[in-house]
Image (spheres, rainbow, N blue to C red):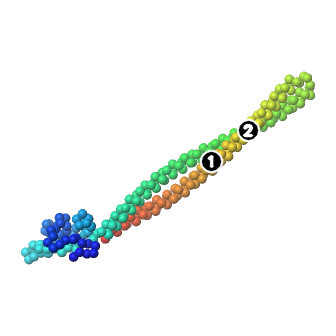
Amino acid sequence: MPAKDLDFRTQPHSPLKPGSGVYKLIHGQLPHVKVTLDKQLHGFPYTVKVGAVYNGQGEIIGSIAVSQSLDRQQTLKDMAGNLLNHISTLAGTAQEITAQSQEISGIARALAQMAKESQAQVAETNRVLGFIKEIAGQTNLLGLNAAIEAARVGEQGRGFGVVAEEIRKLATNSTESISQISAVIRGIQAGSAATCNQIGQVEEGISQVAGAIAHMAGATQELRAMAHLLDEKADAF
């Protein structure tokens, strides 16, 4: 008798299909058989329990078979398998992103360290320039005093006055050069500070990405466990 979701499409006196439960019972001369079959035989998966009917001489004259469709079970197993495949792909992608994030984070840390070292070197250059500027100021003052003394002694101090004037020009030129260099260094400092700030933002962004990936990895593990549970439940039908 065909069920709503289990129809073997057989007619009276139809030949037994090799591999079916009844076929195995008859040809194996077994008292009972339990067989689970896939879609190849009848187009749908099912499990069947077959019991032999004997005559008075102990010969098998018939059988009673009870079949149960495994179509829903197979659907669940297919769903679980597909889910596991998608989860595996997602987990692999998450691992790749994690590895790339770690690599980028390492590069960002190296750049941040280089920027800090650059700032330290600029600060040291500023200190040296300040020292040179101070010396130039003192040199200019000494040149001025020397010029005054040369003017005071008159004709005898003329040659010394020329030297004093050259010293003052050198001090003035040094001061102007130092001012120009200081302006360039201030620009470098501003750029370095902006670079450090941007690198810090990159590191923060990478940290947030890493946190999101870690959360996704946890969710993936939960989904994997659910998929395995779904597969086990399908087997329990």
Q: Position of residue 135 (x, y in %)?
A: 78, 35
Of residues 12 and 107, the one drawn nearer to the viewer in this rendering: 12
The mark nearer the N terminus, 1 or 2, is 2
Residue occupying the point 22% across, 65% down:
41
**Secondary structure found at label 2:** helix
Q: Quadrant of the C terminus?
A: bottom left
**Secondary structure found at label 1:** helix
Of residues 39 and 222, the one drawn nearer to the viewer in this rendering: 39
Q: Which residue is mark 1?
A: 195
Query: Label 2 neighbourhood size at 10 Å, few (<14), some (14-19), many (20+)?
Result: few
Identify the amino acid type marked 2.
Gln
The correct choice, above or below, for 63 with respect to 41 in the image is below
Q: Position of residue 140 (x, y in %)?
A: 82, 33
**Would you say residue 25 is visible in this rendering?**
no
The correct choice, above or below, for 66 with respect to 97 in the image is below
Identify the amino acid type marked 1.
Thr
Query: Label 1 neighbourhood size at 10 Å, few (<14), some (14-19), many (20+)?
Result: some
Q: Is residue 103 left or right of residue 154?
A: left
Q: Position of residue 187 (x, y in %)?
A: 69, 43
Task: Give the total number of marks visible in the rendering.
Answer: 2
The correct choice, above or below, for 191 with respect to 12 in the image is above
Mark-to-mark CA distance, 1 and 2 = 23 Å
Q: Quadrant of the N terminus?
A: bottom left
Rendering quarter of residue 162: top right
Residue occupying the point 54% across, 50% down:
105
The mark found on residue 180 in the picture is: 2
Residue occupying the point 63% across, 50% down:
197
Rendering quarter of residue 69: bottom left
Residue occupying the point 57% across, 52% down:
203
Q: Is residue 57 left or right of residue 152?
A: left
Q: Is residue 181 left or right of residue 205?
A: right
